[in-house]
Image (cartoon, rainbow, N blue to C red):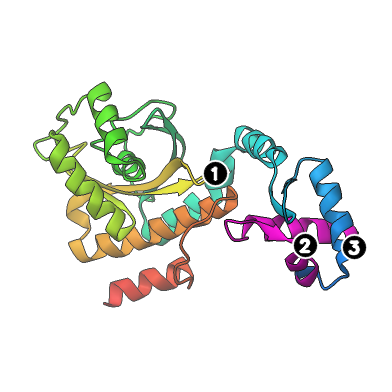
Amino acid sequence: MQSVDRALQLVDKAAGAAPDGLSLNQAAEALGVAKSTAFNLLKTLVAHGFLREERPGPRYFLGMSLMRLGDLVGQQLPVGEIARPLLRELTDATGLTSRVAVVDDGCPVFLERVDGPGMVRFHTALGCREAPHASAAGKAILATYDEERVREICEAEGLVPHTRSTITDVESLLVDLEQTRTRGFAIDDEEEAEGVFCIGAAFMDHQSRCLGAISVTGIRAEVPAWRVLHIGELVRRQADRLTREMGGRSAEWPSPSLDARLRRAEVE
C-alpha cells in the first residue's frame, strides 16, 4: 500500500510541477526516499503511461493514460446524481427552486431540479435545451468561453427576445458576460420570463472546461436587489463544490454553512 500511495503522490507532484517537469531529485525529496526508490516508482508509472519521461534530465510529465481515464470519468459521472444533494442544500438555504444543467454545444440542458417550498412551481422542463443568452445558466456557461466562441454560438442560436428585458445584441451580451466573470455568477433579471429572476454559476470538469451550471429561480418581486447578490455567492459556492466533485479546480471561497451565510445576509 505504501508503494501505491507514493506512486499517486508522484502523479500529483507531476501535475503541479513547473513547465519543465518533475526532476528525479524533486521526486525523491517530495517522498522523502532515496533516489533509487523514486526512480523505480517513476519508471513504473512511465511504463503504464501515467507519466512520460523526457531527456535530458530526465524530467517527468503527466502521461496520456491519464487523459484517456479522465475522458472516461467524465463520460461515466452521473452529474444529476452528484449535484442533487448540493441542490437540496441550495434550496433549503434560499427557498428557491434549484437546477443543474450540462452543456450541449453552448446551450444549457437541465438534468435535475429541486423545487422550492410553497405553492409556486416554475415550469422548468428537464432534458430540453434552453436559450444561452436569456437564462442565468446559459450566460454562466457563455462566460467561460472567449469572444469568438460566444459570437459563434449567438449566430447559431440567434438572440431571440423572450421578454422586453432580453439581451438581443451581441455587444451588450459581451458586456453582461464580463460582469458575470467579475462577480462569479450570472443574473437573469426577467430576461427569460416576466416576473422571474434566475442566478447561475458554472462548474468545470477535470480538464477545466465548462461542464454546465447550477442555477436558482424565484419570483423577482419577492427578492430585493441586495439579497440577489448574496444568493449569487451561495450559488457560486455550490458550483465550486460541484467542480471539485467532478475533479476540477476552482477558486476557494469562504466556507461557513449556507444557512449561516443566508442569516448573515438577511441581517445586513
Q: Can you see residue 117?
A: yes
Q: How far apart are marks 2 and 1 (CA)?
A: 26 Å
Residue type beneath disc 3: Thr
Which residue does the numbered mark 2 point to in the structure image?
24
What x and y, as percent, mark residue 155?
23, 24
The mark nearer the N terminus, 2 or 3, is: 2
Q: In this view, does 146 lie to the left or right of 244?
A: left
Q: In this view, does 29 lie above or below 186?
A: below
Q: Is residue 107 magenta?
A: no
Q: Which amino acid does label 1 sit on?
A: Gln
In the rendered view of the protein, which quadrant contains the N terminus?
bottom right
Which residue is under mark 3? 37
Question: Considering depth in this image, is 44 or 267 the residue closer to the camera?
Answer: 44
- Relative placement, left or right, of 155 versus 70 is left
Disc 2 residue crowd, few under 14, some 14–19, many 20+, Cα 10 Å: some
| Measured Cα–Cα span from mark 1 to mark 3 | 31 Å
* Residue occupying image coordinates x 75% and y 45%: 50
Work out whether residue 115 can be spotted. no
Callout 2–callout 3 Cβ contact below 8 Å? no
Q: How far apart are marks 2 and 3 (CA)?
A: 10 Å
Q: Give the range drawn in magenta.
A: 1-29
- Which residue occupies 33% across, 60% down? 231
Q: Quadrant of the C terminus?
A: bottom left
